[in-house]
Amino acid sequence: MIAAIAALSHANSPSDLNQVAAHLSPDTLGNRYTYRAARLAAGTAAEMARQIVSGAAGSGMALIRPMGHNAAADSTDGGNYFNNVAVAARAAQAAGAKRVMIIDWDIHHGKGTSEIFAEDPNVLVFSLHRYGSGFYPGSGPANDVGIGRGKGRNINVAWCPPTVIDRRGRHVEVDAPPVSDGDYITAFHVLVLPVLSEFKPDLILVSAGFDAVDKDPLGYYRVHPECFAQLTALLVPLAPIGMLLEGGYNLCATAASVEACVRVLLGESPAPLPGSRVAGVTGWSSIMRTLLVQQQYWQSLGMLNFLQLATTTPADGEWEDDNQHDGEEVPEAQGEQEEEYELQEREFDEALEAAA
């Protein structure tokens, strides 16, 4: 595969490019500069990891292209040539990190990362991604947990609306609102943080794709840059962090998300969320699917621990009051949005009763 990508550098005609393309996936484009760019991206990721593990840097953000989380060990895919976060994880291990946790919040499942570390018990891959209805790449269901010694080291929160059975016996997806801030915040509190605390990684690597951000033309989700900053702030106290840029197709929204995360890495407090901190129908059903699959591998996800978390009140400091943001009232538009979501949740409950 490396030889095929390197050959792009010497392709001087369309026929040369066509010969090289035969060794790459159909959706992976390239030109004479691709190999150099891909090597620089992977090398930057590796150097960032080495600097953090050695203590020379406390955290880092690799602003690199092309992205890499879909690339496998021996294949390219979706415009991904070298798997940058996998290279960073191996560089971290070589530098002395015993355990590495990869958190992938790109809206597309990082199937390459998942495959590379499927049997590695010392690298935990936690992905939060859109799933189902033909959404690319179509991998990463909740029951994909890893292989052999790596079982339980592959965790997928596959965002997918619940289904009901209609009167004709067909499985029909519930018409649910798009995944938003509250779904990601809830997934972190219920799943990511308990597992992270139990795994105790020496380094956290974040495949930081921002195509779930509001107004992204591919994702169609409603996650805000402030939410990504909040997620980053939740990770900062727990282990050194290295972030790597993955997807993101609204340049302004991607830039705002990167800035929000970097500000947190530099010590600033994240801005309050413009959206709700409450998970919706898709969020809770997806989180529960993952919880039920993974609790056999993680003591921190046992039902007793989950119930304890679920009964935690805002006074305990776990979550902010959903109706307040730093002493300010929730904007009227947000309140209307939450009322709309509550109406849709009631409709979902009614659909379940009708199906029963």
Image: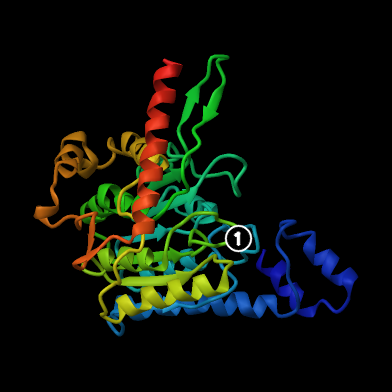
Q: Residue 142: x, y in percent?
A: 43, 39
Q: Amino acid at mark 1?
A: Pro
Location of the C terminus by quadrant is: top left
Q: Given the current orientation, which residue lies at the most extreme front position?
A: 332
Residue 212 visible within the image: yes
Q: Is residue 333 above or below residue 203?
A: above
Q: Nearer the viewer, residue 99 or 247?
A: 247
Q: What residue is drawn where x is 88% and y is 71%?
A: 14
Q: What residue is drawn where x is 48% and y is 62%?
A: 213
Q: Residue 169: x, y in percent?
A: 55, 15
Q: Which residue is mark 1?
A: 217
Name the quadrant containing residue 272: bottom left
Q: Residue 179: x, y in percent?
A: 44, 49
Horizontal relation, residue 310 to residue 350: left or right = left
Q: Residue 237: x, y in percent?
A: 21, 68
Query: Which scheme is used to colour this image of the protein?
Result: rainbow
Q: Is residue 84 above or below residue 132?
A: below
Q: Nearer the viewer, residue 144 or 211?
A: 211
